[in-house]
Amino acid sequence: MSFTATVLTLYPEMFPGPLGTSLAGRALREERWSLETVQIRDFATDKHRSVDDTPAGGGAGMVMRADVLAAALDSVADDRPVIAMSPRGRPLDQQRVRELAQGPGVTVLCGRFEGYDERLFEARDIEPVSIGDYVLSGGEMGALVLLDACIRLLPGVMGAASSGDDESFETGLLEYPQYTRPVTWEGRTIPEVLRSGDHAKIAAWRKHRAEVDTRLRRPDLWERHEGARVRPPSGARRHDEED
């Protein structure tokens, strides 16, 4: 059974978009995954096909209606998880992506305007997910990101089963720096250890650089990585970070 993605959106023409090219596009043509879109507006009940209304309590913008969204979701309900793209959701991480990729697929709800009527989350089993602390015009771009992250993990999509093992976030760390030919470019030379042929030394160098780069560039990831160990006293940890 292939991974099935259903996207509920006001703009179905945005799909598959970039998911129709490269690895994801080839996998789609090979039927390793499938995609269907649902036009939310088809479930509106008035002559204007309204999917939103003014915020209760006043304020700018419009809010997507719970009754319309619930009807759209109910039309495709099955055993797949339902994810609503929302800046109020849990940040998407590689662990959640792996979990989703191992399942039968996902239903993704793309919000617009000021977001969703909160009662939708009280009435249906929906997981709000965010792809970052910034604002987009709608959930469609977030849905593309989520689906791309999942699709590349499906069997046969990336080729070699181990090809993604060392990538950023798979181990809780950023990936080590990569180099390729020419050996020297604009006076800069590939590190000697990577040209040594000594696989043990190369592995040690890559591990060290992954740790250093993560600590410097993403201290939040480094703290979580360190949290897997027995934490030293805060003063000792601070001293170690400053070395």
Image (cartoon, grey):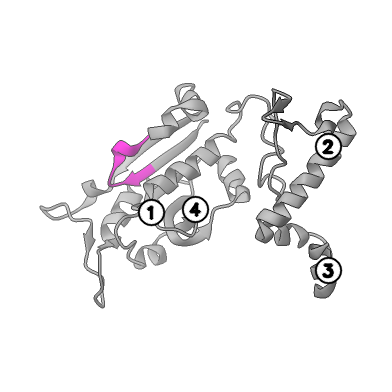
Asked if residue 197 lies left or right of residue 59, the reply is right
Residue 188 picture location, percent across and down: 72, 33
The residue where tag 2 is placed is 203
Q: Quadrant of the C terminus?
A: bottom right
Q: How many marks?
A: 4
The residue where tag 1 is placed is 136
What is the spatial separation of the Cα atoms under label 3 and label 4, in whole angstroms? 33 Å
What is the spatial separation of the Cα atoms under label 1 and label 3, in whole angstroms? 40 Å
Q: Earlier in the sequence, mark 3 or mark 4?
A: 4
Residue 29 picture location, percent across and down: 45, 22
Rate crowding at label 1 as few (under 14), some (14 to 19) or many (20 or more) other CA atoms within 10 Å: few
**Residues in magenta?**
7-16
Amino acid type at circle 3 is His
- Mark drawn on residue 131: 4
Disc 3, disc 2: CB below 8 Å? no
Please tell me whether mark 3 or mark 2 is closer to you in this view: 3
The residue where tag 3 is placed is 239
Residues 196 and 187: in front is 187
What is the spatial separation of the Cα atoms under label 1 and label 4, in whole angstroms? 10 Å
